[in-house]
Image (tube, rainbow, N blue to C red):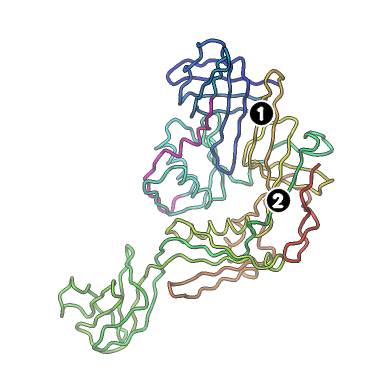
Amino acid sequence: MTTTIKITPPGGVQQVIPVYETCETRLSATDRAGSFNLTIPAYDSTLVDVFPVGSDVQITQDDNEFRGWVVRPPKSLNGRVRLLEFEGATYTSRTQKIIVTESYTDTAISTIVTDLFTKYVPWATVINTQACAKTVTIRFNDDYLWDAMDQLCQVAGYDWYIDENLDVNFFDKTARINSTVLSQANSNFKKGSAKFTPDASKLVNKLWVKGGKAISDSYTQSITVGADPIPLFYTPRVPDGTSVIVTIGGVAKTVGIQNIDKENTKDFLLNANEKILVPDLCNSGSGTIEYCYEYPIKLLLEDQLSQATYGLFEDVLKVETNDKDLAYDQGLDYLAKYANPVITGSIEPMSGSYKPGELIRVEIPSLNVDDYLRIIEVNYESVAGMGIVNRTLQLANRSRDAVSILKDLNKRLAKIERSIYNDTEGPVEKYTYFADSVTNPVFTDDGLAWSLHQYNICGQVVCSEELIL
């Protein structure tokens, strides 16, 4: 088992570092910006200030490849020994300082990802950008690329990072499976390192999703014309390609804008700010007015199976978007993740290469664990002078396939209830789903489901206290 460290200063020549005191790398699916800590002893000043901020760092720990850049290079003196410390992050973090301004209409998400990185990140390739046929209409107005990718991943159910080859990995969360099987039978993890804990702190099965402003579908309001202005229920808005339509006695009438169009030139004058329609040439009769209006996005998502199992748990998720479909997808993903207790855990494999976002098979009969778990975080620690690399995986049970919960309404009419009602701000869309409306990813080697036993949540036996093997 070996550790190799190579550092290249900006515009300089790559150097191999033969000796180190500490060497740790971390990759995470939670924050995506992995990090490293490196300490190099120097007995003279040859290497002092040679590797400044921005230096490229490549670390090989057994079969794990890591690449990042120096963010902080502190230095200290311990007697005659100079200690050069390097703290840094993966190249994924660079997208936190890249601003994008783009607009897309009915465009496949993977096409958007490829376009953004091609335009704004020329130093990265897009070889491992997996196709995603889902289309969205979305605008990025001086947004960080990091935030733009976060939005796209939430809609697609994908994950992403920039790897050690400076290639963008954009992939389905259920598609990447590590070939290693961690099991008691194989004895390929350290004794005492397997630890799993159920967590219901974020349990929610009735979720209110609140976003920005959305434009409604065409709304028809009945009106009766007289001498007085006609109050409108909502503030009219006119999206591109639409208009306000007034029909009296089956005949379409002309509509102008109050204080802009002259009086006695239109049948009606509209004042959107005051929400009134003012009769002008037409002053009698009854009919309708058709218009769109702006309203706060408010969705209600419920999981009745979870409610029946654990009781009612409510929460509010605020999303920063004016796209109702995007708000819906983000809420759906959140509910799919937290409608049941989340099982988290850690384990220390004896060998192997692991990446965050991968699914890995864990078979520990003593803990009733027999399932694919998602790798949330990977930590590698090289032990100086020992030729040993310690690995620690942070794991969590995989989320239910949010895409399958409510997307195909026609196939799930028997299991899904959709209703719309109005409150004081506008329409609220309510979605309720039942048992069997959720499907798990299908794997070629899918095994038995697993559970931990014997503690109560709202009177229901869910699982036990922390278990350690």
Frontmost residue, 463 versus 249: 463
Label 2 element class: strand
Residue extending furthest toward the front: 79
**Amino acid type, residue under disc 1 in the picture:** Glu
Q: Please state which amino acid type lies under the numbered disc 2.
A: Ile
Q: Which region is colored magenta? A: 86-107
Disc 1, SS: strand
Q: CA distance from mark 2 to mark 1?
A: 25 Å
Residue depicted at x 50% and y 11%: 46
Residue at the (55%, 16%) spot, across then down:
82
In the rendered image, which quarter is residue 33 located in? top right
Q: How far across and how far down the image is residue 226, in percent?
A: 26, 89
The quarter holding residue 239 reads bottom left
Question: Which residue is at 56% across, 47% downward?
Answer: 158
Q: Is residue 51 above or below residue 375?
A: above
The answer to which of marks 2 and 1 sits earlier in the sequence is: 2
Using the rendered view, name the quadrant where residue 410 is placed. Answer: bottom right
> Position of 71 compared to 279: left or right?
right
Say which of marks 2 and 1 sits in front.
1
Question: Which quadrant: the C terminus?
Answer: top right
Whole-percent x and y of residue 123? 44, 30
For residue 356, above or below residue 17:
below
Q: Quadrant of the N terminus?
A: top right
Residue 409 in picture, x, y percent from top left: 58, 65
Q: Is residue 98 magenta?
A: yes
Where does label 1 land, which residue? Answer: 381
Residue 343, which numbered label?
A: 2
- Residue 403 or residue 16, whichever sits in front: 16
For residue 131, above or below residue 262:
above
